[in-house]
Amino acid sequence: MQYHTPSSFDDAVALAKDAQGVTRFLAGGTDVLVQLRADIVTPDVLIDIKKIAGVSDITREGDGWRIGVAVTGAEMSEHDTLGKEWPGLVEAMDLIGSTQVQGRATLTGNLCNGSPAADSVPAMVAAGVTVTVTGPNGERKVAVEDIPTAPGKTSLEAGELVTAVHVPARGKSGGDAYLRFIPRTEMDIAVVGCGINLRLDGKKIVEARVALGAVAPTVLLVEEAANAIIGTELDDAALEALAEAASAACNPINDKRGTIKFRTHVAGVLAKRAAKIAYQRAEAAS
Amino acid sequence: MAFDETKTEDFKVVGQRVKRPDGVDKVTGKAKFGADAVAPGMLFAAIVRSPHAHARIVKIDTSKAEALSGVKGIVTRADFATGLTGGDLDVLENVMAGEKALYDGHAVAAVAATSQLVARDAAKLVEVEYEVLPHVTDVDKAMASDAPVIREGAADQSVPEGMHPNVVRYHESGHGDIEAGFAEADLVVEDSFKTEATHQGYIEPHACLAQLGGDNKGELWCCTQGHWNVQKLCAAMLGLETSQLRVTASEIGGGFGGKTAVFIEPVALALSRKTNRPVKLVMSRSEVFRATGPTASTSMDIKIGMKKDGTITAGQGTFRLQGGAFPGAPMEFTAMCAFAPYNLQNVKQVGYDVMANRPKQAAYRAPGSPMAAFAVESVIDELCKKLGLDPIEVRLKNASKQGTKASFGPTWDRIGLVETLEAAQSHPHYSAPLKEGQGRGISCGFWFNHGGETSVTLALSEDGTAQLSVGTPDIGGSRASMAQMAAEELGIPYENIRTTIADTATLGYNEVSHGSRVTYASGLATIKAARAAVKILCARAAAKWGIDEDAVVWENGCAKPSGPNAGEFDPLPIEKLTRSMGRTGGPIVGHFEATPEGAGVSFATHIVDAEVDKETGQTKVVRYTVVQDAGKAINPAYVEGQFQGGAAQGIGWALNEEYIYGEDGRLQNSVFLDYRIPVASDLPMIDTVIVEVPNPGHPYGVRGVGETSICPPLAAIANAVSNAAGVRLKELPMSPPRILAALEDQANNG
Ligand SMILES: Cc1cc2nc3c(=O)[nH]c(=O)nc-3n(C[C@H](O)[C@H](O)[C@H](O)COP(=O)(O)OP(=O)(O)OC[C@H]3O[C@@H](n4cnc5c(N)ncnc54)[C@H](O)[C@@H]3O)c2cc1C
C-alpha cells in the first residue's frame, strides 16, 4: 500500500491519475480506515488530502459559504454563523457518529463514500449545495445529488476529486431541517433520512426542496414532495400530501436495518416532522 | 463468636461501599486483559472460518498459506485429540470443525505467523473446498419434518418417538391436574411468543497467549470466567495431563456467561505445540458474534387460567429452544423458571432442545429464564387487564413463599418474592402518573443461583495483613466483596487484605464464575478460611498465655481471654501474633474447600415505563426500577451495579438486539453498528431497591444477584410497550418495524 500526502490539489490529481489499483482519498478516514480494518476495501494507494492548504477553512463566498474538504463535523458545529444560517445542514453533519468521529469526519467523505444512508447528503441536497470537482481535465461544478450514482459509487472519474463544497446564500425567510430515523438514539446508520429546505413569503411557502436518504440506491430529490407544500401554509392537508409524495418516491430494500414497508412509511412521517421544523425556522428568520 | 455461627448484624466492613482494589489499574490502563500478554518469540494466530451455514468439508489445502513468508504453522482438526465423546466431543467439534462446518463462522483451520498481518493474509490463502448442504436457522423450522438434519444420533433417550433428529433433549415437569385447573378458571388466555438470540456483548473479545511444548507441558493466559474449566477442557482437546497445563486468568472485560466455554484456547495451544513458540490469539468483534455463544432463540406457547379474584388456577408452557448446532440449549431452565414465582396447584411445563445451523449457544446471565418470564408474565398481564385487576396485587396473591411447592418440584425455604412485590408496590414509581403515549409494565423473575466447587486460601503476613487467594475470576467486583468478608472476620481494615485470583496451580478446583455463585460460594469459603486462620491465631495466643484454646475469643483483630475465668491477659493484636508465627508453630494459613449446596434462590420485581412513538414504532424507556432480593448486600454499590446491568442488557434484548440471518444462513449483523446493543443515551437512570431476606445457606445471608436482574426486563418492558402501544407484542426484539406491523395488524383486524 502506498500513502501520499500531496500539498496541492494538482499534485493530488496527478497522483490519483497515475495510481494503479484501488485508490482512496483520505479525508477523516472514518469510512476508509474502518473499511480497511474490516477487510471490506484494502486500498493500494491512499492519498491524504489533509496537508493541502485551505482544506480546513470555512470561508464566505458571496453571501454563501465555501467549506474545505477536510473540515470536520466538529468544526462545522462550532462555527459562529454557519449553523445559524443552515441549522439543518450542520445538525445533519453533527448526527454522524460520536464525539471522536466528529473530530475527523467530513462532508466530502460522507458524500464520496457513496452510502445511500449518508446523513449530511439529503441535507446538502435540500440546501442546494454544489461541489467543485477537479481532475486531469480541469474543474467542474456539480450538484450534490449528481455525485452518488449507486451504493458505494460516484460520478467522479479516475483522477478526479472534490476540492470544495459550496453552500448557497441563505437569503431571507428561509429555513432548513434534517431528521433521520434510527432505532437507537446515537451511533447508528439512518434507516430513513429526510432533509427539507424552504422559503416563505409571509406565511406561504414559495420555494422548497425535499430530499430523502436511505430509501433508494442514491439520495432522492423529490420534486412532487416539494410541490405538495409550495403555495401552502403547511396546513394538515399539505403535510398529508407531502407525506404521501415522500412515501411514493421511496424505492428501498429490505435489509437488516429496516423493511421496505417500514422505510416507505417512516419517510412520510419524517418529511412531515422535518417540514414543520424548517417552517418554524423560516418564520423565525422572517 | 463460635466458628460456625451465622452473622446478620453489627457488620463493620460488610455493607460498606468500599473502593474496588482493581479500580485504579483499570482506569489508568495498567490492568492486564487477555490481549495484553506478550512472550519472547511470540507468534500471532488467525482462524479460517466457514462462510457457509452447513457444508461438508471436502478438502483443506494449506500449501499456499504455508508458502507465505512468516507462516510458522497451520492446524486443522487433525492436530487435536481423537476418541473424545459426549460433551468433550461437542466442544472440540465447535472449536475446530471435523467433517462438516455447522454454521457461518465455524472454525476450519488456524494459522500462526510472525505478525498479525501475515497471519490474516495466510488465513485467506488456506483453500477449503466445501460441498454446501441445506441449512436451517429458525427453531420452529428446525423441528419441522422437512428440516435438514444437522447431526444424526445427537438426541438422547429423553426425546419422545417421532421427533425430528434435530430435537436432541426433552424435559417435562409440574404437578396437579392442569385440565381440572383450566376448568376452574373464569378466564383462560393462551398465546405464542418468540425471542431471537442475543449476544452477551462483553466489551473484551476473547484473547489468549498459549505455550505448549512437545513434552505436553504448558502455560495458558486467557480471558475466562473459569480457568480450571479451561484447563480441564484444553487438556482433553489436546490429550494432555490436566496438571501439566497451568492456566492463569487475565483481567476480564465482561463475560455474562459467554466466557464459561472455550473457543480459541485449544487452537492457540495446538498451534504452539506445532510451532514450538508462544502463540497469541485474539478474536475480532465479528468473530465474537459469529463464533462464540449467543443465547438460545425460542418459540413458546403459554396457557394460564385465572379466577375473577386473580387466583391462578393452572399454568402450562411449551418451550422450544434453539441452541446452535449442538445439544445444550437451556430449555429445562426455561421450563423450570417459567412459573417459579407462583404458588400453583396445577402446572405443567415441557421443553425441547433443538439444533440449528448457528453457533453453539453459551450461557447468558440466568440462561433460559428471561425468555420464560417474557412469555408467562405477558399472559399474566393480559389476564390482569381483561379481568380489571392490579398486576402487583395478582402477583402477591399467587406469590411463592416459604413452604410453597415450587412449579418444578422442591419446596421453598425462606425466599423474598413477596418482599420485592411489596417494595415495588410502595415505591413512588408504581403510583407516579404516566404521560400521554406512555405505558407501565411490571414483571417478576426468578433464578436458582448456584454453589459449586470452591477452594480458597487465606495466608497471613508477618505484619498482620492478609493475602486472600480465590479461584473465581472477578467479573463484578468480587475481589472487593471477598476482602470485605475476610476483613469482617479477621477484624482488620479492608485495605489490609489483598485478594488475588490465583492460577490453577495454586488452589483446588474452582468452578467457573457463573450461576451468581461467586459472592455466595467463594464468599462462604473466604469466611470459613478466615475463621480457620482465626482459630489458629487463638490457639497461638492460648499457647502463649498457657490457657485452653477454647478460653480465647477473637474480637476486633485481637485475641482475648473469653472471660474473667480464663485469666487476666492483655489483648494480643493480630500483628503481634503474626510477627512471631515463625517461632510459634509456623505460617498461619486458613483454607476451605467444599461444594456448598445452600445457594439461596433470588426473586426480583421490575417496574418499567415506556413511551412508544406510534408513527415510527420507536420505544423509549423513560423510567425503570429494579427491586431484588440480595439476601445480604456485601457491597451495596456492586449489588446495584448488577441490578442496573441486568436491566440495561434486558432493555437491549427487548427492544433492538437480535441475530439476523440471511437466506444464505449467514449472520448479517456481526458488528456493533448493526447488532444494536443500547448506547448510554438509550437508557434512563435505572433506580434500584435492595431487599434483604437472608439466605439461610450463607453465614451472612448472601444470595447471588448477578443473574436474577435480567429475568424480569423482557417481560416488564413488553408489558410497558404493549400498554403504551395498545397492542400486545409477542415477539422480541420489539423493534420499530415490528411495533408498526403490530399496530397495523390491529387496525386491520380490530
Ligand atoms: C463510529 C462511526 C459512526 C458513524 N456514524 C455515521 C452516521 O451516523 N451517519 C453517517 O452518514 N455516517 C456515519 N459514519 C460514516 C463516516 O463517519 C462518514 O461517512 C464520514 O462523513 C466520512 O468522512 P471522512 O472524512 O472520514 O471520509 P473518509 O473515510 O476519509 O473517506 C470516505 C470516502 O470518501 C472519499 N473521499 C474523501 N475525500 C474525498 C475528496 N475530497 N474527493 C473525492 N473523494 C473523497 C474517500 O476516497 C472514501 O471513499 C460513521 C462512521 C463511524 C466509524
Image: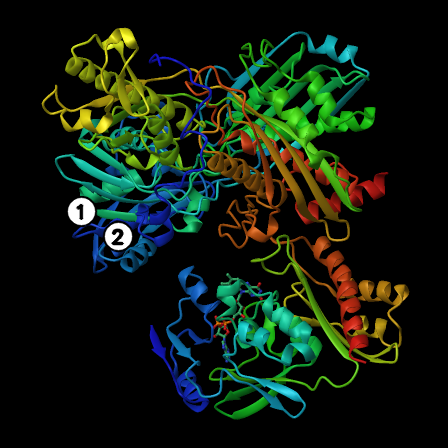
Asked which quadrant contains residue B69, the reply is bottom left
- Label 2 crowding class (10 Å Cα cut-off): few <14, some 14-19, many 20+? many
- Residue hosting label 1: B275
Question: Mark 1 belongs to which subunit?
Answer: B
- Label 1 crowding class (10 Å Cα cut-off): few <14, some 14-19, many 20+? many
User: Quick check: can you spot residue A233?
Assistant: yes
- Residue hosting label 2: B44
Using the image as rendered, state which of residue B27 and residue B361 is in the foreground.
B27
- Which element type, helix, strand or loop, lies under badge 2? strand
Q: Alpha-carbon distance for marks 1 and 2?
A: 11 Å
The amino acid type of the residue labelled 1 equals Thr
Q: Is residue B356 left or right of residue B31?
A: right
Question: Mark 2 belongs to which subunit?
Answer: B
Asked which quadrant contains residue B338, the reply is top right
Tell which circle, 1 or 2, labels the residue nearer the N-terminal end.
2
Using the image as rendered, state which of residue B701 and residue A76 is in the foreground.
B701
Q: Quadrant of the N terminus of chain A?
A: bottom left
Q: Quadrant of the C terminus of chain A?
A: bottom right
Q: Is residue B329 left or right of residue A261?
A: left
**Is B209 above or below relative to A146?**
above
Q: Is residue A96 left or right of residue B274?
A: right
